Image (cartoon, rainbow, N blue to C red):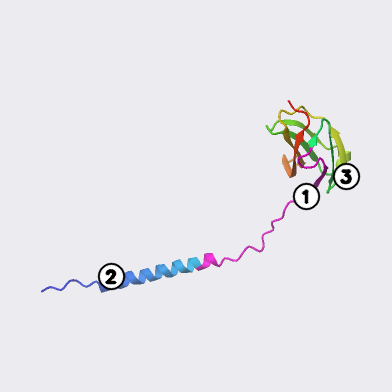
Amino acid sequence: MIAPEKKYYEWIALLVMSLIGMAVSLYGYYQIVNIPPPTSLDIKKAPKIIFIFSPKVNSEIKNPVEISGRVAIPEKTIKMRIKDRNEKILKEIFLPASISTLEKFNTSFSYKTPSTKTGLIQFFEYSEEDDLEIGKRTIPVSFSEFK
């Protein structure tokens, strides 16, 4: 009678390779789980440079609108924009240089008649060289007159 061929070496090789594979997987898992939190990242929130005193959030504004506030860092180019809820720009102006060099400002200007009851007033520092709007503040408002 012929005995079946014994494949001890193949089974041992399969067992050893399985153990090595498990060890590598567990080592990789250990490395991933024990990654230290980042400590050297220098993530900073953009400083708040524009503070608006009037109009308040969700207040009703008239045409012309009076706006007062404070610029924390003088000599910045500050831009203001009034938009209705349809994203139609009703007025967009720069604060005059004489105002933006002072800390506090108070200005008044007229805008086009809005087509919606509500809208937004946006304030931001404008970087002309990069065409960026930095430190944007948005105040939701309602209009006293609309189409």
Taking 25 as reference, is 135 left or right?
right
Specify the principal SS of the magenta part. loop
Q: Give residue 43's quadrant in the image.
A: bottom right
Q: Nearer the viewer, mark 1 or mark 2?
A: 1
Give yes or no for residue 54 being in the magenta stretch. Answer: yes
Up the image or down, 36 lies above or below 127; here it is: below
| Residue at the left extreme, as displayed | 1
> Residue at 74% across / 29% down in the picture?
114
- Crowd tier of the residue under label 1, counting other residues whose Cα lies within 10 Å: few below 14, some 14–19, many 20 or above: few
CA gap, disc 1 to disc 2? 69 Å
Mark sitting on residue 21:
none
Task: Tell me what residue is drawn at x 36 percent, y 69 percent.
Answer: 17
Residue 1 drawn at (x, y percent)? 10, 74
Which residue is drawn at the image coordinates 29% and 71% (left, top)? 11
Amino acid type indicated by mark 3: Lys
Q: Of label 1 and label 2, which has the lower sequence position? A: 2
Measure the C-alpha gap from mark 2 to mark 3.
84 Å
Amino acid found under the numbered disc labelled 1: Lys
Give neighbour class at mark 3: few <14, some 14-19, many 20+ (Cα, 10 Å). Answer: some
Mark 2: few, some, or many residues within 10 Å (few <14, many ≥20)? few
Q: Position of residue 5 (x, y in %)?
A: 19, 71
Q: What stretch of residues is rendered in magenta? A: 30-59
Q: Nearer the viewer, residue 74 or 63?
A: 63
Residue at (88, 44) in percent of width and height: 104
Tag 2, which secondary structure?
A: helix
Badge 2 amino acid = Glu
Q: Marks 3/1: CA distance? A: 15 Å
* Residue placed under numbered mark 2 in the picture: 10
Q: Which mark is residue 48?
A: 1
Q: Position of residue 52 (x, y in %)?
A: 81, 44
Q: Which residue is mark 3?
A: 104
